[in-house]
Image: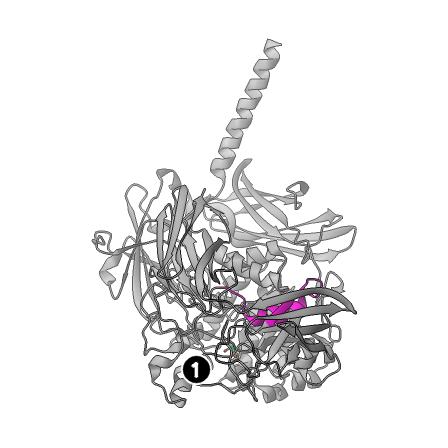
Amino acid sequence: MNKLYKQYFLLLFCALLLNHFQVAAQRESRELQKGWKFAKGPHPEAVDSEFDDSSWQDVRIPHDWAISEDFIKDGNGSTGKLPWKAEGWYRKKLEINEAYKNKRIYLVFDGVMAFPEVYINGKLAGKWDYGYNSFYLDITDFLNFSEENLLAVHADTREHDSRWYPGGGLYRKVTMLVTDPVHVDIWGTYVTTPIINADTATVRISNHILNTSKMGDSVRLKQVILDPSGEQVSAEKMTRFLAAGEAAYFETSAKVLKPQLWDLDAPNLYSTLSQVYVNGQLRDEKKTSFGIRNIEFTANDGFHLNGRRVQLKGVNLHHGQGPLGAAFYPRAAERQLEIMQSLGVNAIRNSHNVAAPELLELCDKMGILFFDEIFDKYDAKADIVDTTDFEDFAHRNIRNFIRRDRNHPSVFMWSVGNEIGDVQWNINNGFRRLHTMLNYVNKYDPTRPTTLVNDQLRSAELRHFDLYDVHSWNYGRRYRIARKLQPNKAVVISESASTVSTRGFYEFPLPEKKTDFTKSLQVSSYDLNAPEWAEISDDDFMWQQQEPYVAGEFVWTGFDYLGEPTPYTNKEVEELGFDAEAASRSSYFGIVDLVGIPKDRYYLYKSYWKPEEQTIHILPHWNWEGREGEKTPVFVYTNGDCAELFVNGKSYGKQCKKPESTVSTERFRLMWNDVVYEPGEVKAVAYKDGKQIGEKILKTAGKATNFSLTADRKIIQANGKDLSYVLVEAFDKKGNPAPLANDVLQIEVTGEGHLAGAGNGNPQSFEAFQNDTVNLFYGKAVIILGSDFEKGTLKLRVKSANLGTETISIKAE
Ligand code: GAL
């Protein structure tokens, strides 16, 4: 017995020891969040290790150097009126462990705006150009293993051009990766699933393995596949000799039985574990998640996922996160996706640039399709400048973009760019450049369809579509010429709507034309306005019903974003007789506002995209003092097919949707244009197939007397980047929402966390985003709380002169 015990303990000890070595052998990945210093301006001397940066600002990554600044009132609204155009320096001491001496050390940057130059101990270790792309550097040979090391990064947006607010600096995460000299390359794992049946799927895995050591060795790869629950389902091995400095592709393939497919409502994720052994010792281990799913575009029956048609109910999302700017917080992105899914969105287009990698991880996990796009135009918006060698630029940027993103099951299409005028018209070697880009896409991933997103209708006659797979066109049924010339290719409406509105704001009478805008500097929320090149949401719904071959649409946009404030850009407000200060600083395009609060349009999309869920939404609000006796149109957005409308008990009759109407609004909304305003209540009773499905009541609110604070999450992680979004809503004393409240709120945050930003969705608000005050805008605002690294409680206290004080506590764990 005793002996048995001894043997048991010896075995346990050996196992633990082995485990220890295995853990130590694995790659170490550390996010460099803390300990950074930052200064704007030219500081070339900052590369020097001896440079004194004690007067510089302490910052945490992600960091957008302009978002907390004051607005430049007479600045350019199209890029957000914030001082993003600048150069800046970041410095950080790197802790390099002695034990790293025989390792390879990389820095991975997920995005630096823009033209980053990375210095280690005074020497240039590498640089990049395109501010939205990920890149990495091997910094091993620049490091001192016995002394302190200094990392300095220069970012420069002065040559960057943009049509929206781009942000500036180290706005996405920076990771230090430590590996064995023999290891799988960064983004070096590539998983494809060439054959998928109900019984089995063939999984092909390629690993690019590097031997960066000074010795040749026999390298064994053990390639394991784990199913969605983490169970091992296959393990393949292969061995080959890698000479010193050699790199090679190790290709294995395996069968997965009864594959659990990745799908929208069952986003099953498998993973591969690539284990690299040298002399029987585990040297590197890399986990990569992937999905097994079939995607197919058909010419006449849209897009198919796993063999069934899925209409793409998509939205475009820019990279910004409202009051947080370009700084990428995973939780902010997750919340965006949650809000979008709640109205029925099943696809995202990352207009128009390489996204943060976490966004794709989220789409994989949440079951959202991803239209992966690399560029907006091929000019300074893509950080292509006079000295750029296009071939080299295209190759480097496409390589990183595709290699980084190609294992995500959510990615269903690659787009090489948006609305590139000279490419569409084949000017300046446009088609050659297009061809170059597409060749590189196919070089790194031939398994997905490719596209170019177009807006120049007649350019289709030059047949640029012969070079790529899917017709993608923005607005106004512009796809029709391309489709006629090449009917064997599928069609995607890559940008639809561009309907504009301000949350909570209504104007009378209703606009006669979509482009009727007033001097109010806000856009009426009856959802009848769009710029001249665009349309209202209902038009796109109707066109897709009339042309069922269209695979779906991507609404411009899901969220409002900073910049591009059509119809109140500087030029437009000047035409209205205002000066530059009147131009807005954020867009009106969103289905939800800049801070994620639904506009009326949210309910229009939800009623059509999520017919299985009850939607009964009445607009406008019912507080129209001074309009008594005047005609005040009332619209109802519902998943029902009819509704009856009552004002103070008096019926205005039943309206039903008219599915055959050629007036698109009549198909999708219920409208009572002759309602006469009287204070009290307006009620809609909705019906579907003749049966009552529910009702909704809107009341005239009294004076606002109080407000509530509602946190989307009361527990967040103490990881320095988690967030809680607190919705502030005003009410009258009877508890009715107060739709006109515009009180100033004083914000105080104490305890373990900080104020990350606050906002209200008013494109005309010039209150800095990280100030400790925010105004209610049509009764609502959002305050964003961020965690630090200490666990504990975070307290938000909000005070208003007329509405009292409220507090809420959030736990950071
Ligand atoms: C499109 C463009 C988008 C945005 C939109 C506004 O033409 O691709 O980036 O500018 O117009 O309607």
Residue shown at the point (57%, 58%) measured from the top left: 338
Left or right of residue 349, residue 200 in this image: right
Q: Is the N terminus in the top left, top right, bottom left or bottom right quadrant?
A: top right
The location of residue 392, given as percent across then percent down, is: 46, 70
For the view shown, which residue lies furthest in the top direction?
Answer: 2
Q: Nearer the viewer, residue 202 or 582?
A: 582
The location of residue 608, given as percent across then percent down, is: 67, 70
**Alpha-carbon neighbours of circle 1 within 10 Å: few (<14), some, or many (≥20)?**
few
Q: Which residue is mark 1?
A: 520
- Amino acid type of the residue that numbered disc 1 sits on in the rendered structure: Ser
Label 1: which secondary element: loop
Residue shown at the point (46%, 78%) measured from the top left: 522
Image position of 309 with respect to 755: above or below: below
The location of residue 612, given as percent across then percent down, is: 71, 63
Q: Which residues are magenta?
A: 596-618
Residue shown at the point (53%, 27%) measured from the top left: 16
Magenta region includes residue 485: no
Residue 520 visible somewhere in the drawing: yes
Image position of 449 with respect to 75: above or below: above
Magenta region includes residue 608: yes
Q: Is the C terminus in the top left, top right, bottom left or bottom right quadrant?
A: top left
Residue shown at the point (79%, 50%) measured from the top left: 199
Residue 328 visible somewhere in the drawing: no
Q: Nearer the viewer, residue 595 or 397?
A: 595
Left or right of residue 611, residue 121 in this image: left
